[in-house]
Image (cartoon, rainbow, N blue to C red):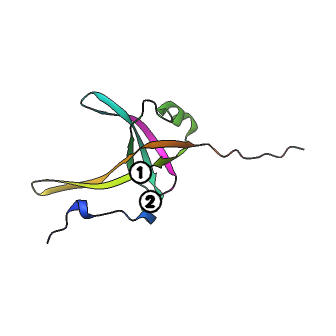
């Protein structure tokens, strides 16, 4: 019996609790804006990248703010990651799709400076 790609699951221990955002773009389909896509890196998976789509009117961080800050960490509510696959003749492409109900920006930790 062949294995279907939908039968595969990503173990919970491979997922992060906080994700580093490297890019923010509009998520749209057929010209309709659906929300925002946050491209994140996964250090536990050899820094693989994944785009998490969130339905919302405004992004939690704009691309300009991300460029200015250089680093932004987020958490996702109800994150669902699912594999997908597509075959075109002899070629097979596969990847991960991810959606979440909401994204929350984690405030930068302020380093305390001691002044004398």
Residue at the disc numbered 2: 15
Residue 17 is one of the magenta-drawn residues: yes
- Residue at point 48%, 44% (across, down): 21
Q: How many marks?
A: 2
Side of 61 where 87 appears, left or right: left
- Image quarter of the N terminus: bottom left
Q: Which mark is residue 93?
A: none
Label 1: state its secondary structure. loop
> Residue 47's spot in the image, x, y percent?
44, 56
Side of 12 where 92 appears, left or right: left
Marks 1 & 2, CB-CB < 8 Å contact: yes
Provide the residue span drawn in magenta: 16-26
Label 2: state its secondary structure. loop
Image quadrant where residue 53 sits = top left
Residue 71 is one of the magenta-drawn residues: no
- Residue at point 56%, 34% (across, down): 68
Residue at the disc numbered 1: 79
């Amino acid at each position: 019996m062949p294995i279907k790609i939908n039968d595969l699951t990503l173990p919970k221990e491979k997922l992060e609790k906080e994700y580093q955002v490297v890019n923010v773009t509009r998520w749209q389909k057929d010209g309709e804006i659906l929300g925002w896509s946050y491209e994140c890196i996964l250090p536990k998976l050899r820094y693989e990248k994944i785009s998490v789509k969130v339905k919302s009117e405004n992004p939690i961080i704009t691309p300009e703010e991300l460029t200015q800050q250089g680093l932004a960490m987020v958490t996702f509510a109800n994150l669902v990651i699912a594999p997908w696959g597509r075959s075109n003749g002899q070629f097979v492409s596969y990847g991960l799709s991810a959606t979440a109900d909401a994204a929350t920006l984690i405030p930068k930790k302020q380093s305390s400076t001691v002044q004398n």
